[in-house]
Image (cartoon, grey):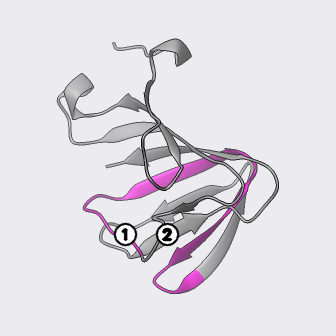
Amino acid sequence: MKVITPDLLAEDLSRADGVVMKTAFNKKVTGKDASMGIAVFASGVRSPMEGEVSHKGDEYSYVLRGSLRCVCNGEEFTVRAGDFAFIPSNTNHYSYNPFDETAEVLWILS
């Protein structure tokens, strides 16, 4: 068993888009391709800053606090605290926070 306490989360504060990524599990920690962590979107933050992103692996999310707008293949969704979301592998998408409150999202990429 591997336990990662909040003080051990690896934080990436250097992202140009302003999202603070707090990664708990990745291949370096588990030897597996899946990863898990928390993404923090301050008000006004968009990821990626321009365009869209897609990646190998399904993305599962749970909104811990706040709200985000997510655009997947041109369709826009609003996800709020308590909502779960699923983005299939290789789906073009981006997320942004047009709201006043910071949003925190628990994510799993498998």
Amino acid carrying label 2: it is Tyr
Q: Which residue is mark 1?
A: 53
Horizontal placement of 31 versus 3: left or right?
left
Q: Residue 81, percent across and down?
A: 75, 49
| In front of the other: 73 or 86 | 73
Q: Vertical placement of 91 versus 83: above or below?
A: below
Q: Which residue is mark 2?
A: 94
Q: From the image, which quarter does the N terminus lie in?
A: top left
Decide which of tag 2 and tag 1 comes sooner along the chain: 1
Horizontal placement of 60 versus 58: left or right?
right
Magenta residues?
Answer: 52-75
Q: Residue at x 43, y 47 (%)?
A: 15
Q: Residue at x 82, y 55 (%)?
A: 100
Q: Mark 1, residues whose alpha carbon is within 10 Å: few (<14), some, or many (≥20)? A: some
Q: Mark 2, residues whose alpha carbon is within 10 Å: few (<14), some, or many (≥20)? A: many
Q: Residue 16, percent across and down?
A: 44, 53
